[in-house]
Image (spheres, rainbow, N blue to C red):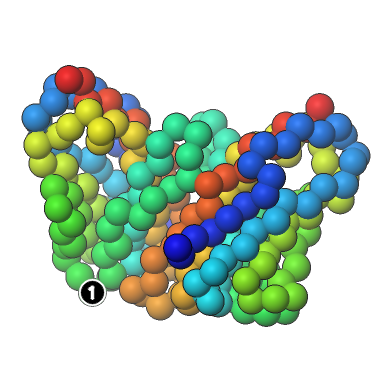
Amino acid sequence: KQEVTQIPAALSVPEGENLVLNCSFTDSAIYNLQWFRQDPGKGLTSLLLIQSSQREQTSGRLNASLDKSSGRSTLYIAASQPGDSATYLCAVRGNTPLVFGKGTRLSVIA
Amino acid sequence: EAQVTQNPRYLITVTGKKLTVTCSQNMNHEYMSWYRQDPGLGLRQIYYSMNVEVTDKGDVPEGYKVSRKEKRNFPLILESPSPNQTSLYFCASSPGLASYDTQYFGPGTRLSVL
């Protein structure tokens, strides 16, 4: 059964820092991996989707990488801003529907 | 605006009183699903639907029912709610299950069962 782990569970950084969030999964037979953002009391917003054949995707200050063979993905956030404060969720899809990690709660301090 | 809508957004009810949470998408998506989110457990899938009249169980289907009579709607039914169903519920949709298909989530329904 697929298991997704996100480390760290919480992270606090000063504004302007570059940071990396980690996601690992146990079954490398995936179709894609998605990173989502969740604000308190709100729904999930898709940030990036990496197909299993891809190595990375970029959107603005965000860059996500995928190493399927080692079961790892990272989300890199450049020049962090207070508005980046949220919970970031990683989810993988294989033969079964999406399996989520428990998230990393990010606080960016001005 | 392309979106997934859920109603109600907040609901307090009592044990045993049947309720329905509606979900609707305006993107002509084939795939729809329901998740619940609980502290320490993360998001877990309840049911999903590949298309009209095609539904299947997710990881935690006990105590829930769904139907997919129209492509745009996917209601979640709790026939006899219990306190352990107190949770934050999300509906999601995607065009299909291709490797490039992104999932779009609704705003969530916070349910309390007393």
Name the residue: 87% across, 34% down: B15
Name the residue: 50% across, 34% down: A41
Occupied quadrant, residue A59? bottom left
Q: Position of residue A31 (x, y in %)?
A: 36, 71
Question: Quick one: A88 or B26, which is closer to the camera?
Answer: B26
Name the residue: 10% across, 41% down: A78
Q: Is residue A1 left or right of residue B21?
A: left
Pointer 1 chain: A
Q: Position of residue A100 (x, y in %)?
A: 44, 50
Occupied quadrant, residue A48? bottom left
Relative to B31, does residue A47 appear above or below in the rendering? Answer: above
Please state, as top left, top right, bottom left or bottom right, where the C terminus of chain B lies in the image: top right
Which residue is identified by label 1? A53
Q: Is residue B58 left or right of residue B104?
A: right
Question: Quick one: A103 or A80, which is closer to the camera?
Answer: A80
Q: Secondary structure at mark 1?
A: loop
Relative to A45, does residue A80 appear above or below in the rendering? Answer: above
Q: Is residue A72 left or right of residue B32?
A: left
Residue at the far front in the pictured view: B1
Tag count: 1
Give neighbour class at mark 1: few <14, some 14-19, many 20+ (Cα, 10 Å).
few
The answer to whether residue B64 shows anywhere in this view is no
Residue type, numbered disc 1: Ser
Name the residue: 30% across, 62% down: A49
Q: Position of residue A88 (x, y in %)?
A: 34, 41
Please state, as top left, top right, bottom left or bottom right, where the N terminus of chain B lies in the image: bottom left
Q: Position of residue A18 (x, y in %)?
A: 10, 36
Relative to A50, does residue B77 appear above or below in the rendering? Answer: above
The answer to whether residue A33 shows anywhere in this view is yes
